[in-house]
Image (cartoon, helix red, strand yellow):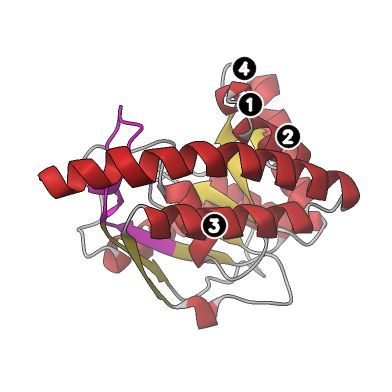
Amino acid sequence: MVRRFLRIALITDPVAAVLVPLMGITSGVADLLDRRGHWGHWVAAFWSRALLRVAGVELEISGAEKVPRRRPVVFAANHRSMIDIPVLMSALPVSHRYLAKRSLVWMPFIGWHLVLGGHVLVHRATKAGAVKTFSAALERLKEGVSVVVFAEGGRSAGRLRSFKQGAARLALRAGVPVVPVGITGSAPVLPKGSCHVRPGHIRVRMGEPIETQGMTKADAEPLTRRMEAAVAALIAEPAPEAA
């Protein structure tokens, strides 16, 4: 316990305090030079790997070979911790953008990257805001860029929560596959309410892509349940019971 505390206080936190502004500035410049956002994405991916390595986080990745390389996809993932974002940034094998809480825009440096990098800011307060969010995510897919959706609609404190239909509707509208992604071990690394990244082991498993061609919007509910079951299997948890 003492050794872990010293590592966080003397290594992880000071290095993170340097890496965060460095990433924000560097990715911001990269995004200005490459309006597609790809350069900024790879800067963020490099920063994410560096942060996890410095913090003593061991990342185990499997199934990356299943992800299509020549067409965009919707990644549907579970969500236990804020560290899930740099974890997926490190693990996913293709350039992607996140559906991110709008409040994150006000975070120094991180907010710059979200705005300049073309990530989708989630507007939850109104129906018009939800439509705007959906349209922005659809636009990313039409541009050939994959989108990550935390399908539970937020962080879960324990077992997997029932998936929202947003990821399914987005994939159906764009006509792209859904790739289920299961994350385990991230909650102890960065617990809710903490800003200190702890050493640990995180596993990311990518499942078989689920094709949506030939489906209609009427398939949103069964597709959502199929995604949910796939992620539950990847994290070895029972799927939530249908409401």
Pick whichever of labels 2 and 4 is earlier in the sequence. 2
Is residue 140 rendered to the left or right of residue 126?
right
173 vs 92, nearest the viewer: 92
Q: Mark 4 and mark 1: span between their CA atoms?
A: 19 Å
**Which labelled disc corresponds to residue 73?**
none
* On screen, residue 64 above or below 182: below
Tell me the kind of residue under disc 2: Val
Callout 1 secondary element: helix
Q: Which residues are magenta?
A: 181-199
Tell me the kind of residue under disc 1: Val
Pick whichever of labels 1 and 2 is earlier in the sequence. 1
**Which labelled disc corresponds to residue 115?**
2
In the picture, the quarter occupied by the N terminus is top left
Location of mark 1 (residue): 105
Residue 36: image location, x then y, percent: 84, 53
Q: Which residue occupies the extreme top position in the image?
A: 125
114 vs 5, nearest the viewer: 5
Tell me the kind of residue under disc 4: Thr
